Amino acid sequence: MIIMKKDATQAEIEGVVAEASKYGVHCDVSRGEVLTIIGLVGDEHKVPFSHLEVMPGVKEVRMIETPYKLISREYNEAFQGKDESRIIKLKGVEIGGAEPVYIAGPCAIESRTQLMRIAEEVKRAGAHVLRGGIFKPRSSVHSFQGLGAKGADEAREALSWLREAGERFEMPVVTEARGESQVNLIAEYVDIIQIGARNMYDQDLLGYVGRAGKPVLFKRNFGASIEEFLSFSEYIAAEGNRDIILCERGVLPIGKGKNLTRYTLDLAAVPVIKRETYLPVIVDPSHATGRRDLIRTMSAAAVAAGAGGLAIEVHYNPAESWVDAQQAITPAELKDIIDDCRQIHKIVKG
């Protein structure tokens, strides 16, 4: 990163950007309360840093060793002048703020009636953000793929229901984009675009969603290391989008573990990620465990580990859920979980 002097002029900043761009790197300009930082995205080995360091307006050139430079705490602290975490503000909800945020709703939207009922009940239970799947990635082509798979008209109608529910019950809404062709349509209706675990490695999709102008809920792939997870989130940040919500949702279990839980919830990832980056971190206990009887316990553990929120699948009658019925909980159970987690958060924060 190139750290500009406090009194650097706009012309000097633009001069450094123009010079650095000659070497095939993208320049990410961040203007903080104290300094302006120019982050170089690309193959920095081609850049003559000794030349850039003596250009007018440049204070210093500093190398960031991690592969996830733009989302690192070191980069953020340099231009903010202090070590802060990012807070994403949406319709009165602060993700990454002082209190955990609870995201809840059906795994898949089945009908307008189903969505409205669940939205009303999760709001009453204490949820802040409404989730609902329209384009569902599934392991089997014969499984229900979401209403969006039926066609463009059906997708738009389901998205309109989601936005209507969010407006009626005063909650931001989130749904998953399964591919680039869905991003622009989804962005018309939702407040947050989700990238699911299966698409964590899709560089083109990450770049596309980074340019969509919406916060991104980014899930860790079940086979990804923490370093890979953060490195791929950098593809979103490199497009100028820092409103990224990182979501831990479990990694592949070892041995017979898969017979007992769907994945292994890596709660150690939460404090590690919070140390490495300034982005908010939440946990999805529904996909991590795949068992409704474990959601309450693992939700409490996630908040105790420092998670800034939870994403939980809820249905008024889990047995009737078209997708992932075994891991959906009722609104009443959600309320108990939120009540527990609020008490745990108070204890952890002292």
Image (spheres, rainbow, N blue to C red):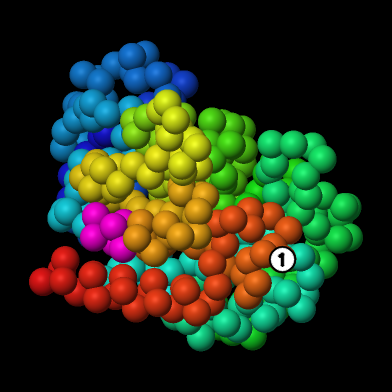
Depth check: 314 or 10 in front? 314
Look at 73% across and 58% down and name the residue there.
Answer: 322
Q: Is residue 172 magenta?
A: no
**Residue 120: x percent and y percent?**
60, 83
Q: Is residue 98 left or right of residue 179?
A: left
Q: Which residue is mark 1?
A: 320
What secondary structure do most residues of the magenta stretch adopt?
A: helix
Compared to 115, does 298 lie above or below? above
Depth check: 345 or 206 in front? 345
| Residue 79 visible from this viewpoint | no
**Residue 243: x percent and y percent?**
44, 55
Look at 63% across and 53% down and name the residue there.
Answer: 324
Compared to 247, does 53 lie above or below? above
**Residue 171: x percent and y percent?**
54, 77
Depth check: 237 or 121 in front? 121
| Residue 81 visible from this viewpoint | yes
Depth check: 15 or 124 in front? 124
Question: What amino acid type should be assigned to the residue bearing mark 1?
Answer: Glu
Magenta region, residue range = 300-307
* Other-residue count near label 1 (Cα within 10 Å), few / some / many at <14 / 14–19 / ≥20: few
Quadrant hosting residue 94: bottom left
Q: Specify the farthest residue to the left.
A: 350
On the rendered image, what quadrant is the N terminus found in? Answer: top left
Compared to 42, does 267 lie above or below? below
Q: Is residue 121 left or right of residue 237?
A: right
Q: Is residue 12 left or right of residue 119?
A: left
Classify mark 1: helix, strand or loop.
Answer: helix
Look at 16% across and 71% down and name the residue there.
Answer: 347
**Residue 75: x percent and y percent?**
25, 42
Look at 34% across and 42% down and name the residue there.
Answer: 266
On the rendered image, what quadrant is the C terminus found in? Answer: bottom left
